[in-house]
Image (cartoon, rainbow, N blue to C red):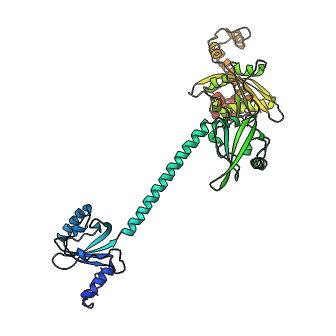
Amino acid sequence: MTNPKNNFWTSGAVPLIEPEFLSSIIGAASDIALVVSSQGVILSVVVNNQDDSFGNLKHWEGRPIADFLTVESISKFKASHGVYLSGKVPKKSLELNHSDNAIWQYPVRYTFHRFGQDNAVLLLGRDLRPIAETQQQLVKAQIALEKGYEARREFDARYRVVMANIEDAVVFLSVQTGRIEGANDKAANLLGMKADTLTGATFSKLFSDRTGAELLESLMNATLSNDAEPISVRATRTQKTLSLVPVVFRAGGQRVLMCRVLENAKPFITNYTSSDHDGALIQQTTDGIIFMDLQGSVLSVNDAFLNLVGAANTTDVVGSKLSDFMARGQIDLDVLLENTNQTGHMRAYATRLINDLGARVPVEASTTRLNDPQNPVIALIMRDVSRLDVIRTTESQPTMHDPAHNVMDLVGSASLKDIVAETTDVVEKMCIETAVSLTRNNRVAAAEMLGLSRQSLYVKLRKFGLLAKE
């Protein structure tokens, strides 16, 4: 109809539409049609015969359209009608809310069309009530969803408060997957891990004497009996003997085990009696004492080590890698582990610990491997040597046993420059040889230990003939 080349509708081939047919065509083309005069009076109302929801609107004819519009729609109609009277047909549709004696309201989207003479306008409208009802349903669904989210957040808050304040150690376990779905800090402390790292972990892997299928079967069997004994297990990290008291319930279509974790035996460091001299020594000594597994994970510590790293509780340390608290990180830990595993012990390894504030504390570490056939561990003693470093750096006079005393014999036979150059090379070579030996010929770790780049280390190895040394 809008193609200028098509003159079918303007060539006279189409006869004039009879008045009795025109209203039915207009009614079928829209849900409601209004003919409004230039003064805003409704001249005619045509309603779709297929839709009886509007009822009989013949009483609208001869009355101003403003009588059947809501307050906010009157101004909208007057603005668009004014544009139409100025000679421009509004291109955008106009949404109006009708009201009839303030009993009911319904929205209609109208389009403006020229109707012939006297600036009358034909308004073809689409009923928006189905869309409005759908929107209201969506709003109600969104409100219900938000209420559900709020209830879930409130439930989560209560759950976390209860888990944090109960005296029992509790673990929630999925029967289907065998993984932990939740645990409180007390359970994490007994298992030697942090609560956030426990979530998602396989429960059976936390114990050294149980397999996955066997542990789940034992827990489920215990829930079926009223007088079942607690399940005894041994924690891999803390080496504690624990008891599990399970309760099964169903949530979200899946079975969940709630296990209370009870402690049966004391760990390495615990309260001691007057005859427990070993425990008293470990607890009260001024040197930091650490027990870790063969992979470097901390199993238990004493208060002196907590003071060295500035930790408030043992839970901040237990379960972490010892390298997290060492200045050179994994390099220091690898040196300690490799030498201890090779010889069974290591003496006076100098390094630095990093506390929570970033301060570095110089320490000397001695390690010993405790060869328990079932649960081998490595024990470390770390001593704060910050005061000794000050004494060593301020010591200026060489003794008869000091190797530097031999340098005095060169005075008079060589210039000071030659003496310093010769002794510097000797000290530099000794340091490089020591670093390479401690790191088991790991050149990258040795360079890190000496504070050199890898290229500089290779240059010095070649200089002293140590490049091919195993």
- In the picture, the quarter occupied by the N terminus is bottom left
Residue 277 visible = yes
Image location of residue 285, percent across then percent down: 70, 18
Tell me what residue is drawn at x 56 percent, y 42 percent.
158
Image location of residue 468, percent across then percent down: 75, 34
Left or right? Give the position of 387 relative to 339.
left
Image location of residue 171, percent across then percent down: 67, 42
Of residues 86 and 160, the one drawn nearer to the viewer in this rendering: 160
Of residues 297 and 163, the one drawn nearer to the viewer in this rendering: 163
Corner quadrant of residue 208: top right
Tell me what residue is drawn at x 37 percent, y 68 percent.
129
Image location of residue 372, percent across then percent down: 82, 32
Total numbered badges shown on the rendered structure: 0
Left or right? Give the position of 300 relative to 5.
right
Residue 184 against residue 436 in the figure, above or below: below
- In the picture, the quarter occupied by the C terminus is top right
Of residues 426 and 306, the one drawn nearer to the viewer in this rendering: 306
Corner quadrant of residue 74: bottom left
Residue 462 visible = no
Corner quadrant of residue 397: top right
